[in-house]
Amino acid sequence: MPSATGWSEPVPSATPEPAPAVAPPLQGGCLCGAVRYEVAAGALGAIVLCHCSQCRKAQGSAFAANAPVRSADFRLLAGADELRAHASSPGKWRSFCGRCGSPIHSHREGAPEWVRLRIGTLDTPIAARPSAHIHVASKAGWWDIRDELPQYPQTEPGRR
Ligand SMILES: [Zn+2]
């Protein structure tokens, strides 16, 4: 609408700023907050629910919820000096917070370009959902799987 001056006044934009072209990273951390990390947007691989006996011990639960992330897309923001690692089998390292014990990720010496993130430590909500149950051959007897996801006796096919 023309103003008294005859010129159209600039209309204030309803949206303050255009969204950044690059989505913000996902954030997460351990229970006590000493360890904080971020994962590049879109870098989270397929989520699997791992029922192996080692994951059950490490989580204290029926299964772990893990997703592969390229090491280059995982960045530790705080707590590098608190992070401890346990070799649960030769060359397989499980990293956890040395203060509160939260499992953060695991990696294999033979595949340093990947970490397998424990996604229960994510704070940022994600749209992705689990894709499969794995290592169901060593599942806890007290846990009944009651969903329709594929189940694999060992690792999922095409695992990275
Ligand atoms: Zn902690």
Image (cartoon, grey):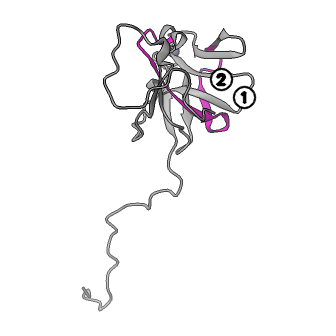
Indicate the quadrant where residue 5 lies. bottom left
**Residue ID at (63%, 12%):** 84
Q: Which mark is residue 107?
A: 2
Q: Amino acid at mark 2?
A: His
Q: Is residue 7 above or below residue 136?
A: below
**Residue ID at (24%, 88%):** 4
Residue 33 visible from this viewpoint: yes
Q: Is residue 37 magenta?
A: no
The magenta segment: 58-84
Q: Position of residue 86 (x, y in %)?
A: 64, 10
Indicate the quadrant where residue 71 lies. top right
Q: Residues within 10 Å of mark 1 (few under 14, many from 20)?
A: few
Judged left or right of residue 95, residue 26 is left
Q: Position of residue 145 (x, y in %)?
A: 35, 20
Please name the residue that numbered disc 1 is placed on: 112
Give SS at disc 1.
loop
Cα gap from disc 1 to disc 2, whole angstroms: 7 Å
Q: Residues within 10 Å of mark 2 (few under 14, many from 20)?
A: many
**Residue ID at (53%, 53%):** 22
The answer to whether the residue labelled 1 contacts the one labelled 2, judged by CB atoms less than 8 Å apart, is yes
Q: Position of residue 113 (x, y in %)?
A: 70, 33
Q: Amino acid at mark 1?
A: Pro
